[in-house]
Image: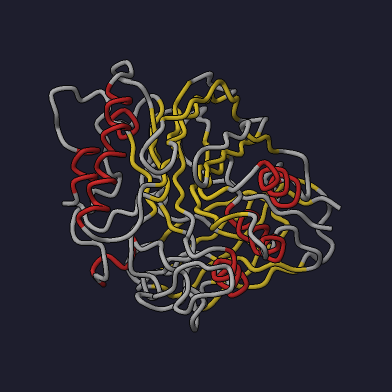
Amino acid sequence: MLYLFLFIFTASSNADTIKIATYNILNFPDAIGIQRIDDFRKIIDFEYPDILVVQEMQSQEGIDLFIDSVMNYQENLFEVVPFNDGPNTDNALFYRRDKVEYLSSQYLPTPIRDIAEYRLKIIDSQREFYIFSVHFKSSQGSSNEMIRQQEAAILRNHVDSLDPGTNFLVMGDFNIYYSDEPAFHTLTDNLANNNGRLFDPLNASGDWHENSDFANLHTQSSRVEQLQDGGAGGGLDDRFDMILCSQSFLDSTGLYIISNSYTICGNDENHFNIAVNYGVNQSVPDDIADALYYASDHLPVIVTITDGIEQDIPKEVVKIWPNPMKTEAQIRFPWHDDFQKANVTITNILGQRVYAAEIQNPTDFTLRRGKLPVGIYFVHVEIKGRYDDHNYYSKLAVVD
């Protein structure tokens, strides 16, 4: 069996990278939760986060099922923060024990659901940071907006009490429809105490709801019709799921978010008001689009944080699927308007070339293992354009 593990390669010197995903997993485990396990496996294998933060976890039974059957179904790499059974659906955080250390957690009660605070430390650099997982009140209307503002105020008051310069990320299902909503102002406004002021890494203010101008930000709903699991329909038309951050995470020194690493799995900007797997999805393979459709009515949102000095980090990296691979895999790389051809090279850890191919026009191709032995390899994709060349890298591990 062949396992392919992907990491973002940066030009940072001695930098640790931690890939963080937030995902509303839709009332897990419900009556058909076991049927969704294979879909969750595909999504997690495809994105391969170091930290996964989820909302709508229902129980300790759900925690046990998800870590055993999704996160650790191939290898025992992940731990989970002890479950907190709050008054409604709950948060959970899974983390790779070789990259992240869990330090503590606490839970902030709100009118609807608890806000989870997780204090973590990167093992290699020993830098600490916080993750807050939120799931604000849903639905439109002034009364629901008022409840969301109350929830946001509870969070803002708490993070304002943190020491200046503290690194923290706030992520989850905000259920906010537009940036002028009171809850968003409460989180992001410049106030007298700005220790806890939050920032949108994309700086994308506006009316996100049902607005095709923000199609690249929409995370809900992955379906048009309502399925048996009870998730919402309507197609992709809301930016409910977000990752916001402290000012410290926007500075390219210390611990910070890698430029352009903010992505939404399955959002190719071409599925406004339609299902994520309708037709061809340009951002993920067909089986991943199908998995996103059936797993939840939300899409995962992802950022990568690092420790070091940022230099020339590509917007997108090469993705390889499936993971694990038995005989072949699809290598997908970014599209460019001036695309003419791509040179794909695979080298071993000694820098020796073990595979080379020239690709015309398509944005992916099939890699067949052949006689490629067990080992660590590097995939290099050089896209030749009319006006410029672009280089992308990913790392793969081959094991039997």
Residue visible at 77% across and 40% down in the picture: 76
Residue that extends furthest to the bottom in the rendered view of this protein: 279
Q: Nearer the viewer, residue 85 or 196?
A: 85
Residue 118 in percent (x, y) is at 50, 29
Q: Is residue 399 visible?
A: yes
137 lies above or below 381: above
Q: Nearer the viewer, residue 145 or 259?
A: 145
Residue that extends furthest to the top in the rendered view of this protein: 163
Residue 259 in percent (x, y) is at 36, 44
The image quarter containing residue 195 is top left
Residue 41 in percent (x, y) is at 68, 57
Q: Nearer the viewer, residue 53 or 7?
A: 53
203 lies above or below 250: below
346 lies above or below 386: above
The image quarter containing residue 233 is bottom left
Residue visible at 28% across and 46% down in the picture: 148
Residue visible at 38% across and 38% down in the picture: 170
Q: Is residue 40 left or right of residue 363?
A: right
Residue visible at 57% across and 54% down in the picture: 47
Residue 278 in percent (x, y) is at 49, 81
Report the coloring of the rendering.
Answer: secondary structure
Q: Is residue 224 left or right of residue 331?
A: left
Q: Is residue 6 left or right of residue 341?
A: right
